[in-house]
Image: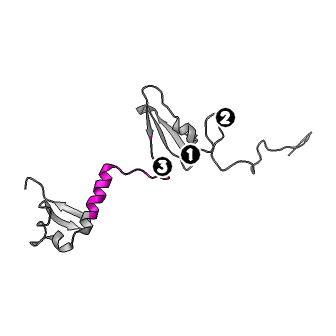
Amino acid sequence: MESRRGPLKSAVPSNVVSPVRRCSRTACGRPAVATLTYVYADSTAVLGPLATYAEPHCYDLCAEHSERLTAPRGWEVVRLLDGSTPARPSGDDLEALANAVREAARPRERAAGAGGPGRGADPMEVARRGHLRVLRSPDN
């Protein structure tokens, strides 16, 4: 299409548009690393890993803005962990790992007990299937 001044040009050439999503904050051009959504019914702001595609009612934030995020008074901010940073193990995780190592180190004959199922090291254990145990109710 031509005008009196020559051929019309697109306002933004398609080869200049970056596939990298940028922070939604005004005047911030850093790459986005997190997505912010609001749950108005619960007065909650949810900050999680960068969504796979841009949503109209979500905001992409860079690392700096996602760390400094605050919510209005009376609102709660929920920060979801992303898969790129390893989570620190809790005390329960470490205890479960220690128990699993102890269980694996026990000889099979002693673990099964001399009198068949239910007579192993744990008197409440009735049966075993792989790593799962069936336990007897304490009132039986």
Give the residue type that dot 3 points to.
Asp
Q: Residues within 10 Å of mark 1 (few under 14, many from 20)?
A: many
Q: Is residue 127 magenta?
A: no
Q: Residue furthest top?
A: 73
| Mark 1 residue element | loop
Which quadrant would the C terminus be assigned to in this image? bottom left
What's the distance in space between the residues labelled 3 and 2, CA to CA? 26 Å
Residue at 71% in and 47% down: 17
Against 63, residue 130 (above or below) is: below
Nearer-the-camera pick, 23 or 55: 23
Residue at 58% in and 41% down: 62
What's the distance in space between the residues labelled 1 and 3, CA to CA? 10 Å
The residue carrying mark 1 is: 33
* Residue 82, numbered label: 3
* Residue 27, numbered label: 2
Q: Tell me, yes or no, if residue 125 can be seen here.
A: yes
Which range is magenta? 79-101
Q: Residues within 10 Å of mark 3 (few under 14, many from 20)?
A: some
Give the residue type that dot 1 points to.
Val
